Amino acid sequence: DAKTTQPTSMDCAEGRAANLPCNHSTISGNEYVYWYRQIHSQGPQYIIHGLKNNETNEMASLIITEDRKSSTLILPHATLRDTAVYYCIALYSGNTPLVFGKGTRLSVIA
Amino acid sequence: GAGVSQSPRYKVAKRGQDVALRCDPISGHVSLFWYQQALGQGPEFLTYFQNEAQLDKSGLPSDRFFAERPEGSVSTLKIQRTQQEDSAVYLCASSLGRRSSYEQYFGPGTRLTVT
């Protein structure tokens, strides 16, 4: 699985969009980009995943660059409940062991 | 419906004791994963089952760690002769296990403290 690089921490004002970047320059053609988050004292939670096209669901949007070397997770209207560690993971299948890395600690501020 | 449950939620063990951590996956989920999360770190993979078969145990840190899933449902992670470095949160996740399945569902974890 390709290595991913994320900023250690970010702040976002409540109600604003949170844009979380991820670099995955060595990603191969059939590796997906997955995002999970972990709220304090809880297990990780799946957010979204994509291969080439941009994706959107009820939680977030995922923008993947054309060369697939980086992506951005967008939480359109961040709330205090979105404060968590966000993990970007590159892998061939969601049904395989996840390699989490250190993630980005997002703090949403009132 | 019920999610993944784990028990106990908290466990304190004296160094040298054996512990058993239980995971109840979502009903019908074929795949089951165990992860270990040290304080301030991301979860790290320990082992993986498909039904009752343990397909990958490459992440188990030592032969003191043993996992089983005898009937392809509930799983138990056993740690023998616990050491202080075993203190961590142990997370269990399950998924449908189909080739197209993409989401792992995590339990709340068991926090193990070895004193």
Image (tube, rainbow, N blue to C red):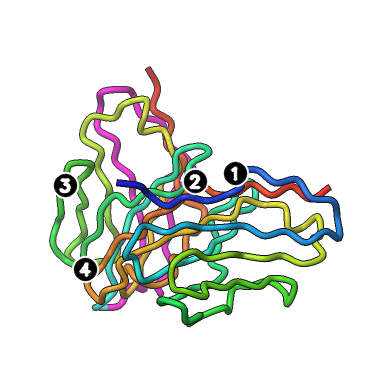
Q: Which residue occupies 59% across, 55% down?
A: B90
Q: Which residues are magenta?
A: A1-28
x then y, percent, for residue A9 = 47, 40
| Element at label 1 | loop
Identity of the amino acid at label 3?
Asn
Residue corresponding to mark 2: B108
Query: Same chain for marks 3 and 4?
Result: yes
Identity of the amino acid at label 2?
Pro
Residue contact between numbered discs 2 and 1, judged by CB atoms under 8 Å: yes
Residue corresponding to mark 3: A57
Distance from Cα at disc 4 to Cα at disc 2? 37 Å
Disc 4 crowd rating (10 Å Cα; few below 14, some 14-19, many 20+) is few
**To which chain does the residue with label 1 belong?**
B
Disc 1 crowd rating (10 Å Cα; few below 14, some 14-19, many 20+) is some
Query: Same chain for marks 4 and 2?
Result: no
Distance from Cα at disc 3 to Cα at disc 2? 24 Å
x then y, percent, for residue A15 = 25, 23
